[in-house]
Amino acid sequence: MDYNKKWMKNILIPTDFSENAWNATKYALELFKNEECVFHLLNTYTPAIASSRFMAATIDGGSIENGAHLQSKRGLQNWLERIGKTVKNPKHSFKTISSFSFLVDEIKETIEEIGIDLVITGTKGASGMEEVFMGSNTVRIIKSVKNCPVLAIPRDFEFATPKEIAFATDFNRFYTTSELQPLIEMAKAFDAVIRIVYVQYKIEALTELQQFNLNMLRKYLKEVEHYVHTVSELNSVSKTLEVFSEELDIHLLAMLNYQHSYMERMTREPVIKRVAFHTQVPLLVIPELGMSKITKRDDEVSISSI
């Protein structure tokens, strides 16, 4: 890939017009300030129809939907105006999508129709023990989107150029170049260091498979400055990564999302274990792209099916 060319062209930003979403929007505008790209601002609405049998006869469902549609369109226009007042960048263009649909369904459809390169979404802040990991919408997006990276921005995070990127993995799975591409592109774009972090449950040597996968990973990252860190688990994966990110001043945490991955484990951890982890830094989640057929390329290993 020619890294001098645009590496992210179509960015999707779902918004519910909250300050959460505004922080994610600001982050996106700053992250891609030097890139020519199109931001697709998405708002979905599903107006609640009154269920009471006493009210049903007096309510026009069409009027409710039209009212919600107008509110959505007006909200997106206000969003555009707010962006215009905050930053003017000739490299950026904007399109709005107002849809009577469920959020995750519309995101998946938009990714397919437009060819979205990245979804950027805000995450909710902590709200006591009832806190759902990153907010239920964000988790649903991460679990459902299978063909596009998702970048989750914490509610109160102030933009910092991602010079230090942590890539959390356990080396138990082979990586494909296409899966690692967003990570490599991000590192090259910002001249960042990638810190591969392995959370170890007990002190023991890597298995033969893990060592092979680590060697391949380092091969893929050969053009990027990178280091491997092995850390002992502290109470939970999420807490361990939080502490690691704080100690090394990490600006972006990246993970692959596949069965038994750190990402999957974290979304399943008991709330009591992950209550302290509220994505203090932006989280880049890269979906599993599958490995049914990988052909030999240059001097890479050849795998016909895994």
Image: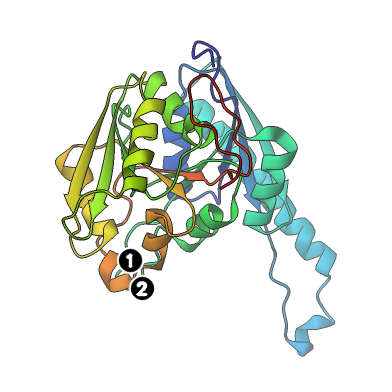
Which numbered disc covers residue 162?
none
In this view of the protein, which residue sits in the foreground, 91 or 268? 268
Q: Which scheme is used to colour this image of the protein?
A: rainbow
Which numbered disc covers residue 127?
1
State how many labels appear.
2
Verify CB contact (< 8 Å) between mark 2 and mark 1.
yes
User: In screen coordinates, is 118 left or right of 160?
Assistant: right
- Residue visible at 51% across and 34% down in the picture: 82
Q: Amino acid at mark 2?
A: Glu
Looking at the image, is 283 positioned above or below residue 114? below
- Residue visible at 54% across and 57% down in the picture: 143
- Residue visible at 59% across and 33% down in the picture: 117
Q: Secondary structure at mark 2?
A: loop
User: In screen coordinates, is 48 left or right of 22?
Assistant: right
Residue 64: % across, % down: 76, 64
Looking at the image, is 109 positioned above or below residue 60? above
In this view of the protein, which residue sits in the foreground, 210 or 226? 210
Q: Please give the residue where the numbered disc 2 appears in the rendered image.
A: 130
